[in-house]
Image: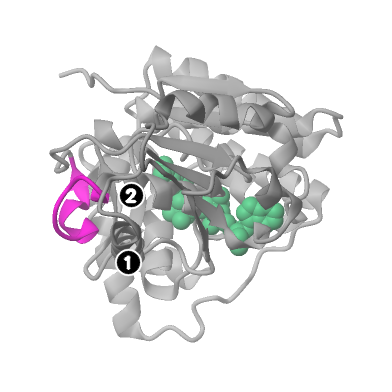
Amino acid sequence: MFRNFKVVSKVIFGRGSLNQLDDILQPHRTQTGGFMVFLLDDVFENAPLQKRLPLYPNDMLIPVNVHDEPKTSQVDRLRDQVKAFSPNLPDGVIGIGGGSVMDLAKAVSLMLTNPGSSADYQGWDLIRNPAVYHVGIPTLSGTGAEVSRTTVLTGPQKKLGINSDFTVFDQVVLDPELIRDAPKEQRFYTGMDCYIHCVESLEGTYLNMFSQAYGEKAMELCRDVFLKDLPDSDDRLMMASYFGGMSIAYSQVGIAHALSYGLAFMLGIHHGIGNSIVFDQLEEFYPEGVREFRQMMERQGITLPRHIMQPVSADQIERMIDVAMMLDPLWENALGKDWKSIMTRERIRQLYLAM
Ligand code: NAD
Ligand code: ZN
């Protein structure tokens, strides 16, 4: 069976394209009593970016904190906050921030029209009703959350996305000026998420020409960004993220992502940095990718955290192995159908202990 997947229907790209947001939202505003919900990464609270948002008197601006990656409980609370604000559904939900805020915007737009808790929908194609119109505006690039059909959430039982066609943004605004002031380390780690998407997609058994075409271009752009000094590196990184996301949309990620999910679930380590910590241990699986990743780290002056497993108990490690091993498609993409004979619990334990 070939996957028949939905893509973002409208994309605007270019420096300063955020200035067109008012025009973009206008046709979606209903005349009476309508309102838009802006979820803004709270690093921008009262910053110039907040002042540039086209807020109307009825609109709701919610600064959101993403110190912890998005949780199902946080999504449910935000949904309740919007429902308490008005008996009507909003005309739209707009997420402005990195992957975390974009994922929150996707999840809230879904949960406004689907009953129950967001934890009920962690999985594949469990959503029944279309979401409220939703828009993603990245302020960090690399995750591909702007193009993906998932919103990654940590729930009571698992870290797993709400994967559905309804999850995909109706509109994204790709304005490279918005990522310009991101802190160097954060920019690097989120950017490495994209680089690792490319390696895992291009080296995977699920590879096909669709994924390869996007993945190769994204990889080339990552090299431009992290191994050269070019004046338009923000533009390049923004497109790398988009293309990397398109590449994995039709293939899958691999070992780094599987192990990184365990780190996130148990230790709360964020996606980009977690992937980087794991990837550095995967030379035997992705030799060229890991070598180039280290060159990028050196050139960008990044030092990875070490010995992160020291405070972790044996029980916790077992739980992390459980979380990682649940991700069948990732392992199968990386190692083939017979992956369980290659990647045993013991081997995963050794990889974790080396971090
Ligand atoms: P993030 O959104 O978690 O943000 C990291 C930090 O950077 C936060 O403190 C945030 O406030 C800050 N920040 C954001 N933009 C900034 C800017 N321009 N200047 C200064 N600070 C800024 O980081 P991320 O790496 O973009 O996203 C990681 C999240 O994305 C994780 O929650 C992960 O699960 C999710 N993710 C989703 C997908 C998907 O397809 N939906 C894919 C990969 C990762
Ligand atoms: Zn990723």
In terms of secondary structure, where does tag 1 sit?
Answer: helix
Residue 56 in the figure: left or right of residue 120:
right
Colouring chosen for the image of the structure: one colour
Residue 83 in the figure: left or right of residue 51:
left
Is residue 158 something one can see in this rendering?
Answer: yes
The mark found on residue 317 in the picture is none
Residue carrying label 1? 77
Residue 37 coordinates in the image, percent (x, y): 44, 48
Residue 59 coordinates in the image, percent (x, y): 48, 48
Q: Nearer the viewer, residue 49 or 248?
A: 49
Residue 101 in the figure: left or right of residue 71:
right
Q: Residue at x 41, y 31 (%)?
A: 248
Above or below, 62 relative to 342: below
Residue type beneath disc 2 = Ala
Q: Quadrant of residue 15?
A: top right
Above or below, 91 relative to 187: above
Quarter of the figure that contains the N terminus: top left
Residue carrying label 2? 107
The magenta region covers: 111-124
Q: Nearer the viewer, residue 353 or 105?
A: 105
**Residue 113 on the magenta segment:** yes
Number of numbered discs overlaid on the protein picture: 2
**Residue 224 on the magenta segment:** no
Q: Earlier in the sequence, mark 1 or mark 2?
A: 1
